[in-house]
Image: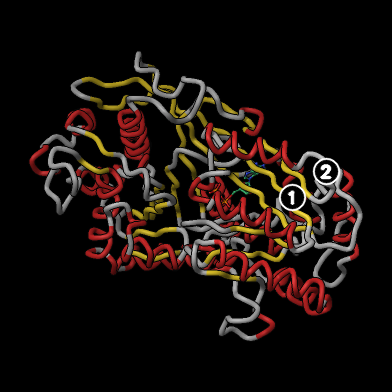
Amino acid sequence: MYIVMVASECAPVAKVGGLGDVVAGLSRELEIRGHAVEIILPKYDCMRYDHIWGLQVSHRDLWVPWFNYRVHCTVWFGFVHGRKCFFIEPHSSDNFFNRGTYYGFPDEHMRFAFFSKAALEFLYQTGKRPDVIHTHDWQTGLVPVMLYEMYQHAGMGDCRACHTIHNFKHQGIAGKNVLWATGLNRPEYYYDRERMGDDFNPTAINFLKGAIVYSNFVTTVSPTHAWEVRHSDWGHGLGHTLWKHQSKFSGVLNGLDYDMWNPQADPHIPFHYDAGNLDGKYGDKQALRQRLWLREAYKPIVAYVGRLDPQKGVPLIRHALFHSLAKNAQFVLLGSSPEPGIDAEFRSLKHQFNDNPDCHLEIGYDENLAHLIYAGADMLVVPSLFEPCGLAQMIGLRYGAVPIVRSVGGLADTVFDRDYSDRAVEARNGYVFHQADRQGIESALDRAIGLWFDYPDAFRELLANGMRYDYSWNRPGADYVNIYNYIRHK
Ligand code: ADP
């Protein structure tokens, strides 16, 4: 099959969050399975150009219709860790992608509407006819709309569209201007609620809604989140649309990059190990203590690694710290928050525990330390309020840091409670709690810390169960191939 990914991010060249990891990881897996994959991205000025190999002009003159004129673009080609990537560079006074950062501008809708249009024009004008165009999040939500309404009549009728929603919070709500610019025109037609009309604003279109309505298949990043967005507020107003289109909607769990996250060969950690031989993990635990000035003692290390965002259950993270210390465990936190209030709260906590030999808080982003924490910690708390997929718990499992998670989204799909899961004993891999309150997280922490102290052999077994799970791209890759085949032959 020939698959083209159209996205606003691709790790590591243009990455802000998990979207970039998915585009890169899934593309790689699809190629391993023998499919031809190309990725189309904007040519941002702030990309990591050091990760592009052989960057060269591929098409000097791509003219993209925009309002009642045409914008001159150059399309570049280069390899990003082996993947074939095209980068679209518009030459216009709008300066859409030369702004020093990826997101956060007042004309955001125009920027990505233009990118979506240019990506389709590029495919159309160069005669590329992919079997499937796979788009991601609101930024490329107009691609399926334009494919169906404009380009399929111009000879792209055999291309199918698959759209993945990583985040329902950002939907791309825009006005008529986008319709005039892209040539979709006809506001009265697109404002229809059966098409792109936003359900909460009669004079706005909703990019993400358009993607749901017009794609041949829509996915989100875990089966439980696929249920949540239809049945609760987590769909951010799109529940009804998803409900109507549920026959073409499902959740596919993201994979983890098993090359990057591999305790047997990770260059960031001093000792390597696997489920059959955990000696290296104990060496890493010691190294972690030395690095963070924690005392050497017969205690488990409970860790948190991640953004300190309200989504992540900040009060529960804080409570986990106090409760772990009260239960004679050590606690390590690595995280950062752009919100001044949360940042100040954790900086003050850091100050409070400065001299405590059982606790360390590191405020900031540190890739290297993150790897050492996953390797050295015995347990990892992930008490999210919502979590579409979540990578931290999968990394914890891979590195033998037993995850203690709240039962939401992808966390519920990947972690199975040692005491209460209905899975076979050897398939249980962590601790799960339900209520987002102190009692909830305490119940799970108490059981985990209790097992570590009282039944160390059983704890090691639980840890090894987790390490044996396969949360690589292997299975999600197969799932996406099935979806592509299904929509091609439907
Ligand atoms: P989200 O995408 O919502 O931030 P995920 O759990 O899906 O959460 O992915 C978070 C990823 O970012 C993990 O790989 C985690 O290790 C990494 N990460 C988050 N915060 C930090 C930090 N402060 N330092 C290093 N790595 C971090």
Q: Residue at x 35, y 16 (%)?
A: 92
Q: Which residue is drawn at 24% across and 35% down?
A: 174
Q: Camera-side residue: 464 or 185?
A: 464
Q: On screen, 220 above or below 85? A: below
Q: On screen, 338 above or below 380? A: above
Report how many numbered discs are placed on residues in the image.
2
Q: Residue at x 53, y 47 (%)?
A: 18
Percent coordinates x, y for residue 363 in the rendering: 68, 37
Q: Camera-side residue: 466 or 293?
A: 293
Q: Camera-side residue: 410 or 248?
A: 410
Percent coordinates x, y for residue 242 in the rendering: 28, 61
Which of marks 1 and 2 precedes in the sequence?
A: 2
**Label 2 C-beta lies within 8 Å of the nearest ligand 1 atom:** no
| Residue 354 can be seen, yes or no | yes
- Indicate left or right for 89 with 412 as reference: left
Q: Which residue is drawn at 61% across and 30% down?
A: 48
Res. 74 mark: none
- Indicate left or right for 14 with 195 as reference: right
Percent coordinates x, y for residue 288 in the rendering: 84, 49
Local secondary structure at mark 2: helix
Residue type marked 1: Val
Residue type marked 2: Leu
Location of the C terminus by quadrant is bottom left
Q: Camera-side residue: 179 or 307?
A: 307
Percent coordinates x, y for residue 407 in the rendering: 51, 67
Residue labelled with disc 1: 332
Residue found at the far top of this picture? 93
Res. 292 mark: 2
- Indicate left or right for 165 with 210 as reference: right
Residue 50, quarter of picture: top right
